[in-house]
Structure formats: C-alpha cells, structure tokens
Image (spheres, helix red, strand yellow):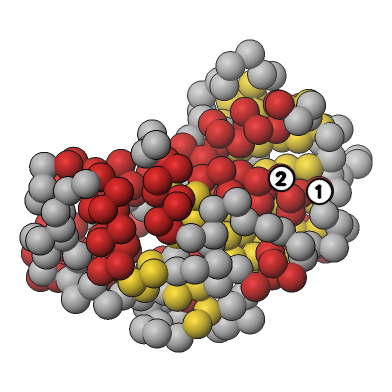
Amino acid sequence: MRITVTGASGFIGRRLIERLESGGCALRVAGRKPVGNLPFFFWEACAENLPPEESLRGAEAVIHLAGESVAQRWTSEAKRRIRTSRVDGTRRLVEALSRLPRRPGVLVCASAIGIYGSRGDEILTEQSPSGEGFLAEVCREWEEVAAAAETLGVRVVRLRTGMVLGRDGGALVRMLWPFRLGLGGRLGSGRQWMSWIHRDDLVELIRFTAEQPAVRGAVNAVAPHPVTNAEFTRQLAATLRRPAVFPVPAFALRALFGEMASILLDSQRAVPEAAQRAGYRFEHPELGPALRHLFA
C-alpha cells in the first residue's frame, strides 16, 4: 500500500513508520522533520499553506497524526497553536485532497478521547455524545473538518486516542522519575478513570483501520480495560518495585499546570467498542501485563 504519513517524527509516528515499512508499504512523509531515508515533503500544520501535492499524489491511504502537543501550559498562544494545528491543519489537508485528480481510499485522522470531556463513571463508546471544555471543543471541530473528506469519496476514520504507553515518549515517561525516586502517588482523588493503550496496539490499530474497508467514523483507540488513576498508580509502582504513597492534590496540579491539569484530573472511561466489533484483537488488553512488557 502507498501511504502518506503526517506527524511521522513524533512518538507514535516513529513506531508507525517502523511497522508499515516492515509490512512492505511504500511510504512518504509530510511534516517538519525527515524520517530516515523516506521521501520527505516539508509541511507545517500550523502554517497557512497546503501540504505539497507531490506528498499526496498516488497515495492509497493518508494517516494524519500532525498536531501541536497538548502537554504544555495552556496559555492563549498555546491554545491557538493547538487549535490551529489540528483544526486548520486538517482542513488544509482535506482541501489538498480535493485538488487531487485521484484521491486516496482512506484518511485515518488522529483525534482524542478528550472529545468526551470529564464524565465520571460513565462508560463511553463511540456513540456517546461529546462533552464540554477546551479539548472537547477542539476535538469536535477537528473531527468535523476531517469528516468533510467523506464528500470527496474518501473513507474517514477518526481515531480517538487515550493515553499512549511507551518507554521512550508520551505521558508515561513524565511519570517515571518521581516513581523511581519513590515519590509517586495518585493524582487528585485517584477515582478518575484513565483510558490507556499500549503504543504497539495503537500502531496496529492504525494499520488495521487503514486496511479494513468496513471501518469508518469514530474509533476509540483505547485498551478494553480502563482503570482508575489509583489503580494505574498502584500497578505502575508495582511494576517498578517502588512505593506509591505520595498523592498529589488536585489544587497543586492546577497551580502547577493551570487549565492543562484537566488532562490529569478528568475522568474518561472509554472502551473500544468499534474496534472490537470490527475484529481487532488487542495484544495488550490489561494494564499490568502491558506495563511489564514495557519494562521487561
């Protein structure tokens, strides 16, 4: 399969490129940084220009991962970059697809379970309505502009990703140092639900949705068994053989991170109903074995 990938130099993109190359795919990269020796086309999702036509011409699939990180203090400028890179960047990508004489069969576009807002103990499937808050608003707009590609005859998959677990990037790396020092603990009450996914499963799910013609629309890219923050903390500490006795109160997180603390304190109990219905089988469905796999 001929595939164009945006955001290929990031934490998820790097592993995705490895997996697709090993599967014999012909790859091109559109983004800010080259990846290996792959054909590279410079494009910034925050800029006003469209992706170069050469980066998309002849592609059978486009996997769109580009976007400003949300793991930063949400100043007005940071919010502008987050929204612009995701919403306007995706709009420009769809516009570039509309100009092609022959369009790809599928667009797999990253989104996030942040679209649901904070929902307590409610079990969230792809049919659940969106919620409130900055991330929910951004994800809602993001998905709407991606879905516009369907009017071009392109199958669109909107991957709502949870917390991605990997040893060399993402949220887990930021958690490790206090735990390794014996200073880890639950965040806030610890009762908030965390929907997570092993990076290898996310990469396989991206490949799966690109290849399965029956899969379209929203797909929760999360493991089948979400856990509370208290349980996540307990299992991470056990895996690292460290105590977890220093809880971090919610007010301290809000003082440190501002509005962005909502990522750590919001409760999202999402399950991968669409992926499992389509036949995807998770290699790492349970948190404990997934963590032990990462730190073996």
Q: Decide: is 130 above or below 277.
A: below
Residue 124 point in image, percent of width and height: 52, 79
Residue at which label 2 appears: 207
**Quarter in which the C terminus is drawn:** top left
For this rendering, which residue is in front, 110 or 73?
110
Q: Is 96 displayed left or right of 225 in the figure?
A: right
Task: Using the numbered discs, state the Cα–Cα distance from disc 2 to disc 1 in whole angstroms.
Answer: 6 Å
Residue 88 point in image, percent of width and height: 55, 53
Q: Is residue 144 visible?
A: no
For this rendering, which residue is in front, 121 or 146?
121
Residue 44 point in image, percent of width and height: 52, 35
Q: Residue at x 42, y 74 (%)?
A: 268
In the image, farthest residue toward the top? 37
Q: Is 142 displayed left or right of 248 in the figure?
A: right
Q: Residue at x 66, y 51 (%)?
A: 205
Q: Residue at x 82, y 54 (%)?
A: 212
For this rendering, which residue is in front, 95 or 144?
144
Label 2–label 1 contact, CB within 8 A = yes
For this rendering, which residue is in front, 155 or 232?
232
Q: Check disc 2 and give the amino acid type.
A: Arg
- The disc at residue 241 is none
Residue at which label 1 appears: 211
Q: Check disc 1 and give the amino acid type.
A: Glu
Quadrant housing residue 56: top right
Residue 286 point in image, percent of width and height: 48, 60
Q: Residues within 10 Å of mark 2 (few under 14, many from 20)?
A: some
Q: Mark 2: which secondary structure?
A: helix
